[in-house]
Amino acid sequence: MNKRSKTLSLLCAWTVLSAVAVQANEPVTIESLLTEMIDRDSVARYPAADFRLKQHSSYNRASKTPDEPEGWFNNKDNNTSDKHDSFIRIEENNGQKEWVLMDHEGPGAIVRTWMPWRNPKNGGTDINMKIYLDGSDTPALEGNMLGMFDGTGVIPYPFAHPSLRSSVNFFPIPYAKSCKVTTDKMPFFFICTFREYDEGTPIKTFTMEDFEAAQALTETTGKALLNPVASGAGDPLSFKAKLGNKEEQSIELPAGETAVREISVKLGSYENADVTRQVILKMEFDGKETVWCPIGDFFGSGIGLNPVQGWYRTVAEDGTMSCRWVMPYKEGGKVTLQNLSGEPVDAELEVKTGDWIWDDHSMYFHAGWRGQYPVPTRPYSDWNYVHLKGRGVYVGDTLTIMNPVEKWWGEGDEKIWVDGEDFPSMFGTGTEDYYAYSWGGQSTDFYEHPFHAQPMSYKYNKLNRKTDESERNSMGYSVETRSRSLDTMPFGSSLQLDMEVWSWTDCDMGYGVGAYWYGFADTTSNRKPEPEEVLNVPPLPNMEGDAPETSADTLKGAVEFEEMSIVSGPKGLVRKSQKLKSYKGNWNETDHVLFKGAQVGNVVEVRIPASSPVAEKLVLHATKSRDFGIVRFSVNGKPAGAEVDLYAPKPVPSGAIGLGAFDPVDGAYLLRVEVSGKNPKSIGTFFGLDCVVLQANK
């Protein structure tokens, strides 16, 4: 580096450091927060005015500890009678009873509120809300609890908006000393999310005068949010390629202090919806891989092409997926697409970079993915999105679930622990509430907003909108996404985000989540590449609504595997009954028994009660699925039938499998099932058995 270049570099670095110092000392105001809301560069730097995100909500107060699951998973997160206490307290102000929803002492700023409709058919309410700041007896902001924050009142769209059957607000309300939020009647559900700044942080408290004075900036910010573009992006680096199975191709990034400012991916075809789960985006910065995520879970599309637009990401109708998170690095990096779909994929990748001055606050962008199928809904459980250690800022996530039944799946609350706290500082009221809508079983239409969206639910997305508002069916895939702006979550030592698995039905669901955060070089996570799990795409149930094709007496003389006793089996094998009425096909009594954890070479022996003292024919009925193996059978020590491959892309009945005729021994038959192999297309070696039909040996 020559002397002149070194001088310019030092001058730029000094300028950035000076700006950070100024930001730390300048007061937090309505204007500064509105500016920060659309400043993507600021999110890539650890906040100069440090804060922790906190939340006061109507979560059930019986939730104390995971050691007491009855309270921990209690689903009554609202208030509908005088017996309920999902609020802070009731007090009297100026002779009027008021319910306290939020009460925070110290400097802070409300950055997000969510309030649902009381009735899914009617968004009106007569409840009045008051926001008191800095101990004043006069509210700084007052109005209808829903109307004030649905975009029709004092707070304009898109900061306030109706979402789906909810009023959601992102307009910042800063305060120097304290904030109290009350209602004049008992609240239903509510969430108030706020920043808690360090003591001594200078803050200019919200006033209506300052709100009016900031109208021009408010309008400019709103327009920017609705028309997102990448700032500071240079000429693109790109490739177009046909990627074979397990092949990858990369773009090497410019050397030196730089930032990725926009990434776009487009595939040649989305006819197979699984391709968005099985094409992987990988990124490496300064020698460390920080991103490993399926493209659908990264860009917010989920499984399949589901167009949506937000402040940080856009999925266009032509299949182009773009993101605008700023991703700085010091020395170099690369962006890679990898195809794990099993078939060739035509792919395009484009990366735009721009200038960046690296400083002590600069952080690396990360994205990780976790998937699991099946996920049992009983007993209730907490499903981990991510656990981070070190220092950084959490900025968003995309959840894709597969629900095999019509009933609502998302009663589960988010629980977020920051910096090793004993109780989560953010305890929510429902999965759909976390993603800013309500009445999930009925709100299955597409919606989008700069900071959150439901790109897909049941059969509906942006290209296929719901027309019957009374329809209640949440079967199939649902995609929920949230990207954070003023409600980012800084952490100093750790962050853990769990979401309850809480469905109204005892069933097996599929879960997949992409999580996004910034961190320093020594920040770590529990998310690692899962190349095998991306192939385990949860199969869709029968989405056509046909009547089940089975009945309890479909197969006469059938003995259900639920009724049989296990004589022997390997350690680690899990035997579980599963309902299959959502899938097309004939299963006896609409269910089977899944033998999960089975591996090649494992043997399971089952006792089948005989129905006659003389020889009978045994006809077995099983299930085929995407993660099932090849099995062979014997009865009473004698080979029975041919080897059977139980692989199929989706769950289907195997049909009748003749085992032969056998004499009972001590009034029973000993069926031996051995996992003998694996179809190359299968992603596992489990097996599922429906029943054995006993027939007279004529």
Image (cartoon, grey):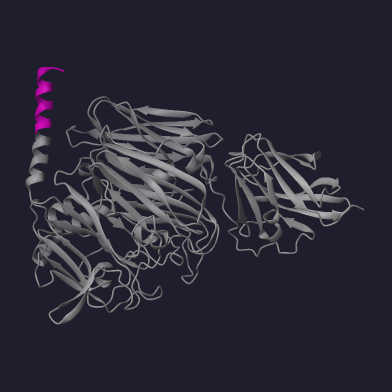
Q: Is residue 333 left or right of residue 306?
A: left
On whether residue 7 falls in the magenta region, the answer is yes
Q: Which residues are magenta?
A: 1-14
Of 442 and 625, nearer the camera is 625
- Whether 493 is drawn above or below 4: the answer is below
Work out whether residue 113 can be spotted: no
The percent position of residue 269, horizontal first and vertical second, equals: 51, 42
Residue at screen point 75% across, 45% down: 671
On whether residue 555 falls in the magenta region, the answer is no
- Quadrant housing residue 344: top right
State the residue lying farthest toward the front: 666
Work out whether residue 1 can be spotted: yes
- Quadrant housing residue 134: bottom left
The percent position of residue 485, horizontal first and vertical second, equals: 25, 51
Q: Mainly helix, strand or loop, the magenta region?
A: helix
State the residue lying farthest toward the right: 698
Residue at screen point 41% across, 67% down: 439
Total numbered badges shown on the rendered structure:
0
The percent position of residue 460, horizontal first and vertical second, equals: 48, 59
Of 263 and 288, nearer the camera is 288
Of 566 and 508, nearer the camera is 566
Residue at screen point 50% across, 56% down: 377
Q: In what quadrant of the picture does the N terminus appear?
A: top left
State the residue lying farthest toward the bottom: 95
State the residue lying farthest toward the top: 2
Residue at screen point 64% across, 63% down: 546
The percent position of residue 85, horizontal first and vertical second, equals: 30, 71
- Whether 383 is drawn above or below 281: the answer is below
